[in-house]
Image (tube, grey):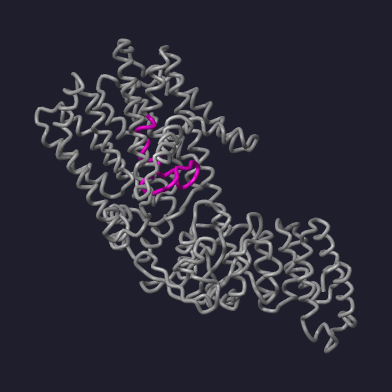
Amino acid sequence: MLKLNPKKSTPLLFAVVTVVAYGLLLPFTGFYWDDWPFAWIANFLGAAEFNPAFAPFRPFLGPIFYFTTSLIPPVPLYWQIFALVIRFIIGISAWWMFKQIWPAQQRIGLIAALFILIFPGYSQHWVALTHINQELIPFIFYLLSFGFTFKALRAEKPLAYIVIALLLQLCGIFPTEYFFGLEGLRFLFLFFFFQGSLIERFTKTLKVWWPYLLIWMLNAAWLIYYYKFGPYNSYEVTAAQSPDKIYFLTEALDAIWKAGFYIWAQVLVLTFRSLPAPTSLLTLGLIALSLTVLTPYLLRCAQTEESHEKSRFASISLIVIGVIGILLGRLPSLAAGLPLTLQSSFDRFMVSMMIGGSLLTLGIVELLIKNQRIKITIFALLISLGIGQQFFNANIFRRDWEKQGEIYWQMAWRMPALEPNTVLLTHQMPIDYETDLSFTAPINWIYAPQYTRSDIPYILLYTEKRLGGSTLPALEPNIEITYPYRTVNFRSSTSNAVVIYMPQNGCLRVLDPARGDEEIYAKLPEVLTKAIPLSNPARIITETDRPAAPIFFAEPAHEWCYYFAKAEIARQNGNHEGVVLLGNEAISSGFRPEDLNEWLVFIEAYALTGDFKTAEDLSTAVLAEDARMLRGLCTVWKQVQAQGAALTGEAVPKGQEGSAGLIESIILSFNCNP
């Protein structure tokens, strides 16, 4: 790379940086968050469905989704590749835009574009199907619109370029409210572009900017109508209804600090906190390698410094544009009362602060550092840190995708099929980038692969989020559940529920009131335990010629959770001998549970098949490992005691005479309460 002509190899530079920052773990990432509902719509209802699907939310997004989903099948790998292409286009578009704005300052434009390409505050790149359409494509339109505005200023016949810029502005600002504040940046770019006094600059700027201002005002009127009086039914605009100067000032400073400063060092905080984890070491190694390669390349790109006075003015203008750009970018999410938290789905709001944050950082370095070599090295370091941050983020999404595969396969193993109109209830899943409604789409995809337009047959609801609302008013039988899932509906009742639970470390399980799970899991959140009486495992079809098979995930190796799921099915069917066989096979294969509660199904089965010694020994071992297991063990042994005739003297199997007394003594030995 070092031998390449910098002026001719810039597109290659952007391509390499894009692949290194976003592509190294690409094959191991997938669908997240709203990707799943959108992919499900595209697969089962067709691309045209996005137009009515977005009508109540962001109606101008529908055509973008329609266009892209018509071209790209709902397959995670395809969308991740497309996201890589879109990222590259963003970098090239930003570079071209800055070349139009600052044709005599190519180095500044190049660095600013690279900052935007790897902007480390935005971690949502891998939520590809959602954010390509919702944010990144409109962002490209806005970048190009800025560029054509300045191209028109130098053209002999500017009208065509002005029209193109206005059309691109429409395509950038109307699909999503994220970029409402960006239009202010065009004014600032123009203001600092023109020469003269402040009044002369303002007059010249307004003369060029007024048609864009009209579109901006039109968009503002549209948003006011749509949010206040129209059909919009997403986020509620709250901040404007209860203004608080201290709140706004705090949030403004927070946005400037995060977007202009902290995000560039964030990767060091995250990696040093988790050393010596392999991902942290790989991230730091990638940062070092990127710095080693980028520094000499960017030094060759550097041009002769401007005069001190002009350079200082340019640096100050970058800082002013950057600060105001960050605040304008924060405006839409702030108006909706939404937080700006990094390393969460809320950092998607950083997309509208990319330009401002990049220019603020660039301006500060330009202003404070006079030595050319040191300045370029700092720029190379910041870009390298951004590359490392995005690689670190990619690994988070890789782990999330891997966890999704575990969840869906454990669902399929434990619940081979489900009765239609089943409500799956849980308080939450141990995963970051999916919600209950995100899970609903793949669950329907897995359990209803032949679905045609009708009410969807399955839904997953988080009691933690939905309880007390219109979807799930209370955890009582026979309460109607109706939910509009974009353009289709789910209809059922709480009497058709199956309650599931998956711990952070452990296997997915179906909770059953008939076996004392309310007592066993009593220390879990109340919003889960209160749902257990609703759980009806009979809605699980354990024998089917078409068992569920998760899409996009290869079946994992059959380890502990596989045997546990199959043992739970055998227990549900009353096949205790089958549970014992599965337990013996799992133990002989060297598998053990992470969650000790998973031993209970095997302890029960050993006892019910007469192997009291194994059941007692296993119970003692579990209790020795964690004394908190006493509640669950006592519940299971009391369940065994109450099992009926086979253990109380009638038709007692050979070798089990006197078993009732033995069970009683075991219960007493564990000091179980009566």
Q: Determine which quarter of the picture holds residue 574.
A: bottom right
Q: Where is residue 296 in the image (x, y as percent from the top left)?
A: 44, 18
Is residue 9 visible in the rendered structure shown here? no
Q: Give the range drawn in magenta.
A: 334-358
Q: For this view, does 648 lie left or right of residue 143?
A: right
Is residue 117 visible in the rendered structure shown here? yes
Image quarter of the C terminus:
bottom right
Q: Which of 530 and 228 is in front in this view?
A: 228
Q: For this view, does 637 lie left or right of residue 547?
A: right
The residue most toward the bottom is 650
Q: Position of residue 465 (x, y in %)?
A: 51, 61
The residue most toward the left is 157
Q: Is residue 89 above or below residue 126?
A: above
Q: Determine which quarter of the picture holds residue 629.
A: bottom right
387 magenta-colored: no
Q: Is residue 500 above or below residue 349?
A: below
- The residue sitting at 49% across, 39% down in the picture is 24
Q: Nearer the viewer, residue 500 or 646?
A: 500
SS majority, magenta: helix
Q: In this view, does 583 lie above or below 388?
A: below
Q: Nearer the viewer, residue 340 or 138?
A: 340
- The residue sitting at 49% across, 70% down in the picture is 473
- The residue sitting at 10% across, 35% down in the picture is 159
Image quarter of the N terminus:
top left
Q: Position of residue 94 (x, y in %)?
A: 31, 33
Q: For this view, does 38 lie left or right of residue 671?
A: left
Q: Position of residue 266 (x, y in %)?
A: 52, 33
